[in-house]
Amino acid sequence: MAPPTRRHTSAIDQAEALFKAATTKPVENASPKANAIPVGKETVSLRLDRDVLEHFQDDGPGWQDRINAALRTFLEP
């Protein structure tokens, strides 16, 4: 009877496997809702016509939220 074969792994491979196992985020079983509003905000660079930007900025602080609300109306059925 032949002795069982051993898998040869280097110390680096073992360390990487342990690190990956310790730092990998577990997968959640819950599926996201189809039209769920994402949590948090994303910083983006967006080119707008000057008059469009001025329209939203005329009412003072909160102009970015107003642009976001206006864009969101196109997502809703």
Image: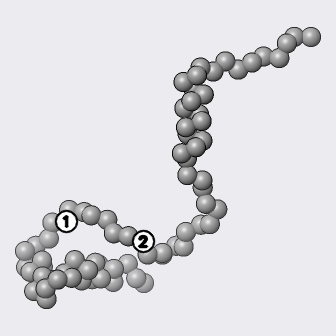
Quadrant of the frame with the C terminus: bottom left
**In this picture, is 30 found above or below 15?**
below
User: In front: 74, or 70?
Assistant: 70
**In this picture, is 16 found above or below 21?**
above
In this rendering, would 58 be left or right of 41? left
User: In front: 67, or 27?
Assistant: 27
Quadrant of the frame with the N terminus: top right
Res. 25 visible in picture: yes
Which mark sits nearer the N-terminus, 2 or 1? Answer: 2
State which mark lies toward you, 2 or 1: 2
SS at circle 1: loop
CA gap between label 2 and label 1 equals 20 Å
Q: Which residue is mark 1?
A: 46
Q: Position of residue 2 (x, y in %)?
A: 87, 10
Q: Quadrant of residue 33?
A: bottom right
Q: Position of residue 43 (x, y in %)?
A: 27, 64
Residue lying farthest top?
2
At x 48% / y 75%, what residue is drawn? Answer: 36
User: In front: 1, or 9?
Assistant: 9
Give the residue type that dot 2 points to.
Val
Disc sitting over residue 39 in the figure: 2
Q: Position of residue 26 (x, y in %)?
A: 60, 53
SS at circle 2: loop
Give the residue type that dot 1 points to.
Leu
Mark 2 neighbour class, 10 Å CA radius: few under 14, some 14 to 19, many 20 or more: few
